[in-house]
Amino acid sequence: MNDKANYSLPDEQGHFGIFGGIYVAETLIPALDELRVEFEKAIADPEFMAEYRNELKHYVGRPSPIYHAKRWSEELGGAQIYLKREDLNHTGAHKVNNTIGQALLARRMGKKRVIAETGAGQHGVASATVAARYGMECVVYMGAEDVARQAPNVFRIKLLGATVVPVESGSKTLKDAMNEAMRDWVTNIDSTYYIIGTAAGPHPYPKLVREFQKIIGEECKTQIVEMIGRQPDAVIACVGGGSNAIGMFYPYIEVEGVRIIGVEAGGDGVETGRHAAPLTSNAKPGVLHGQRSFLMQDENGLIVETHSISAGLDYPGVGPEHSYLKDIGRAEYVAINDDEALAAFHDLCKYEGIIPALESSHALAQAAKMAKTMNKDEVLLVCLSGRGDKDIPTVAKMSGIQL
Amino acid sequence: MSRIQSTLEALKASGRKALIPFITAGDPQPDATVAAMHALVAGGADIVELGVPFSDPMADGPVIQRASERALAHGMTLTRVLAMVAEFRKTDSKTPVVLMGYANPVEAMGYEAFAEAARAAGVDGVLTVDLPPEEAEACAAALKAQGIDLIFLLAPTTTEDRVAHVARLASGYVYYVSLKGVTGAANLDVTSVADKLATLRQHLSIPIGVGFGIRDAATAQQVAGIADAVVIGSRLVQEMEAGAAGLNDRLTTFLTGVRQAMDQA
Ligand SMILES: Cc1ncc(COP(=O)(O)O)c(C=O)c1O
């Protein structure tokens, strides 16, 4: 916890302590080097950053508001819950903050074709959207199982002119989509820019995605003070690969007295083994998708299949910076089970008239759990990372309703 | 001198090029592997590359992905792969064996424990696809302490200063990936490979093997004309995919044809 005031990670090679790094096949290394150099130049270039911010303002609709979920807080009877409304962004989630940044970078690098992996389909939609906006070809890899459970987003991606490639290998979910996107990239490395959708992958991606998502926490830092005159007691976000969470958390690392809480997918319960919570379940560090981080694996180092009601959290790994923040004790990580997330989903619909994404519902459920044990003058700030329209078929099915 | 080095030097002295077949351990089923390795040697293999199956083979095309899935369905693990090498060693103490796979199974076992077990089993070289020189120092030291060669990949995209970096850590041979892509991709372009090898040789004193996209005797012969070793993978794995019936004969026959063509290069 000592060095959080002058926190300046990752280092040159992309390490956050023992985590992060560049664990990829040789063919990709020069491309990652080029990306790192171009990215560092871009974020130091006022013109580039001005264009990025302008797009966020006029195309995405930033800043997104903070909303006091007063009725729900009253119902819970404890701390006040405030929501950072990333669900109100164009395309309905935080993902677009990152895809705008990366698409502008791709354009700057002269790449005309972009590829992306997607789980819930939100990153696929956000990638297809910016590809349309900037006139690029876009191919989205999506696990075949996710194609089935996120049908509305599959259609949205196609409407936006992108191609969806269902991935049939392995567990047919997000990790397999990422494998397939890497295979595409290595094959089309000269023409193609790979827009990774979360704060994971080989260096520089974890840093790059953080830099394009930290707008969430930066806005919060001023907005919440305008509303309540101080910083919150805790910030809370769901963690799949960890992009909305790191966007929310990063500006708060240096703020004393603000607890940082990441919420993983507990699935059927961490104790059942059917979950997607590498940090909460104390998984060993391992190497997957270009990085070293805590990783769900068996004793032979094979990656195990994960489970979550929410496709966007259904991933065996986590971005390396979260592993580091856990290790140094600056952030806490907990898991919320499917049924708890679903209950929070319904609560937000009922008490606030907001349909949250199932991913975000995990963060909401954790806030509800904590709020009940806290005083009424305490404040929890939750990243409502996305809206739940895409999840309506899943929720209907869970409730035994045929749409 | 390592078994890989002495094998490659003996070949060089006799003016021949090394033939390095690749199969995935445990494919199509675990009891087929050791016999298949012997069949490859009978067909003229100088070094055998044994794939360690992994759940997420990011650098592999569909053929080797399916091989991994078949092997894993039979419960293959790194420990069992090492047992297969030990079994092979009982009747072949001469042919070098190189394990090729991904970092995480090795990480899970621990570099030192892996290096010791690999040496005890009779492994001569290790190629870890997703462990580039930037991240390989610790693993390289553990392997070196056990006298095991660490084989690195070089690619069409590799820059000259990276070659120098690889040259400092690599031993045995380096593996030049002939094309931008995954295993089992299209055919390689011999002229561009020859150009790149000329550049690589300015920085490397160890032999260079070429793989990815070599599917027949004619291509193997052309590559043997420019490289020190020829690696054939997906084409052989397709034989495994065709099933266990007559497998060893098919492997030997195919490789014999390649061997003859290469020796005429
Ligand atoms: C709304 C929403 N929240 C969260 C996530 C999880 O991703 P991350 O952990 O990168 O924020 C997703 C991923 O699809 C998502 O769609």
Image: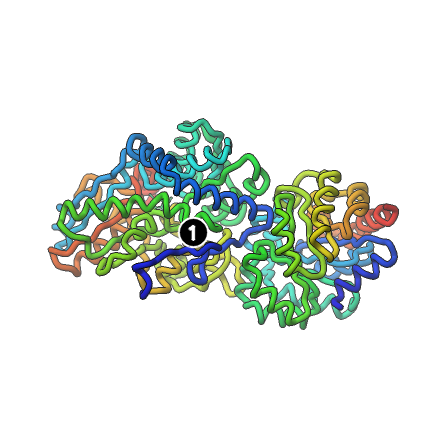
What residue is shown with label 1?
A315
Which residue is nearer to you in this view: B178 or B23? B178
Whether residue A20 is visible here, answered yes or no, is yes
Residue visible at 49% across and 30% down in the picture: A137
* Relative height, residue A364 to residue A333 (above, below): above
* Quarter occupied by the N terminus of chain A: bottom left
In front: A350, or B113? B113
Image quadrant of ligand 1 equals top left
Q: Residues within 10 Å of mark 1 (few under 14, many from 20)?
A: many
Chain at tag 1: A
Left or right for B209, reference A260 = right
x and y, in percent, of residue A268 in the image: 36, 56
Snapshot colouring: rainbow
Q: Quadrant of the C terminus of chain A?
A: top left
Q: Position of residue A75 (x, y in %)?
A: 13, 50
Number of numbered markers: 1
* Residue A121 appears anywhere in the view: no
Q: Quadrant of residue B129?
A: bottom right
Q: Whole-percent x and y of residue A95? A: 36, 41
Residue drawn at x 55%, y 34% is A191
- Identified at 48% across, 34% down, the residue is A164
Q: Secondary structure at mark 1?
A: loop
Q: In the picture, residue B174 is in which quadrant? A: bottom right
B148 left or right, relative to A32: right
Task: Name which residue type carries label 1.
Answer: Tyr
Could you say where residue A240 lies in the image, as x and y percent from the top left? Answer: 38, 50
